[in-house]
Image: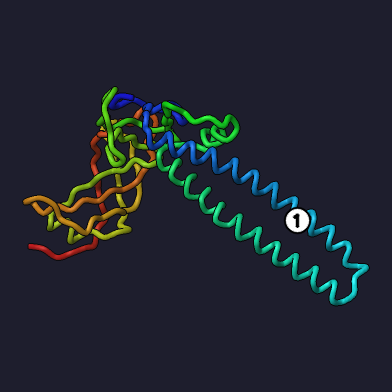
Amino acid sequence: ARPGQRIAAGEPLYEIFSQELLQLQNEYIDYFKRRSQSLQSAEETRARNRQMLESMHGQDKTGREEIDKGMRQSEEQINAMLLPMSRDGERLTARLKFAGFSDAMLHQLISKGKSLDVVTIRAHNACTVNEVSARAGMSVSAMSDILSCTESSRAWLEVVFYPDQASQVHEGDTVQVEFADGEKMQTRLTGLSAISEGEARTVRARIPFKLSAGRQLGDYADVTIQGTPFTAL
C-alpha cells in the first residue's frame, strides 16, 4: 500500500511474519481439536444420562432420586469442563482478531488445521491510505504503527478555533460546509476538544462525514457555524 491509494474491502494492506502470531494460531487450532473431543465426550455422557432417565420409570422413589442426583452431578461436571474451554476460545479469537485476522481466516485455520507462516492483513472496509510507517523487511513490535487507512464512511472535517471563537460555539451548533468545487453540506458541530493547543491556544473539532466520490482526503473547505449570539465592541 502507498499513501493516497484507495483500498477496497478485502484487499491486502500488508503481509507480516510473527513467531508470536504463529504460536497463537497453533494454540487456536489445538483449542478447537480439544473442544471437538470435549463436546463429543459431553454428548456421549448426556446420551447415557438420557438412557438412565428412560430407565427411571421402573425404579422406586429412592432409585429415581439416585439417578436424578447422578445426572445433575454429571451435568455440573460437563459445564465445569466446557466453560473454561469456552473462555479460552473467546480469548484466542479476540487476540487473533486484534492482530488482523478476519472471520474467514479463522475459519481457514479450523478447516485446514494449519497455521499461516506469513499472514496477509486485509482491509475490513474500503479506505484510503494516509500514511505508511513501515517498509519491507522491517521489524515491528506489537505497538508499532504500520500504516493508517481512513474509511470513506469515517472521514472527518477538522475545524480549528481561536480562543475568542471557541467561546462562541457549542456542540450541536449548525455547520454549513462548502468545498472549492461548490459542493455543500450541512451538519452539526461535534467532537469539540476540551484541550487547547500550541501558543495560539487553539481548540479543534472533528466533525465526521461521508467522503463523496471525487473528494480527496486533505481537501480544504469554508465552514460557517451558527453560534450563540453575543455582544461585542
Where's residue 40, x and y in %? Answer: 70, 46
Q: Tag 1, which secondary structure?
A: helix
Q: Residue at x 75, y 56 (%)?
A: 46
Q: Residue at x 84, y 63 (%)?
A: 53
- Pick the quarter of the image with the N terminus: top left
Where's residue 142, x and y in %? Answer: 31, 40
The residue type indicated by label 1 comes to Arg
Is 202 on the left-hand or right-hand side of 94?
Answer: left
- Pick the quarter of the image with the C terminus: bottom left
Q: Residue at x 36, y 28 (%)?
A: 214
| Count of marks overlaid on the render | 1
Is 91 on the left-hand or right-hand side of 158?
Answer: right
The extreme right residue here reads 58
Neighbor class of circle 1 (other Cα within 10 Å; few <14, some 14-19, many 20+) is: some
Colour scheme in the image? rainbow
The extreme bottom residue here reads 61
Residue 171: quarter of image: bottom left
Is 190 on the left-hand or right-hand side of 24?
Answer: left
Q: In this rendered view, identify the residue nearer to me: 19 or 90.
A: 19
Q: Residue at x 83, y 61 (%)?
A: 52
Which residue is denoted by mark 1 in the rendering? Answer: 46
Where's residue 193, x and y in %? Answer: 23, 55
Where's residue 179, x and y in %? Answer: 28, 36
Residue 127: quarter of image: top left
The relative height of residue 195 versus residue 61 in the rendered view (above or below) is above
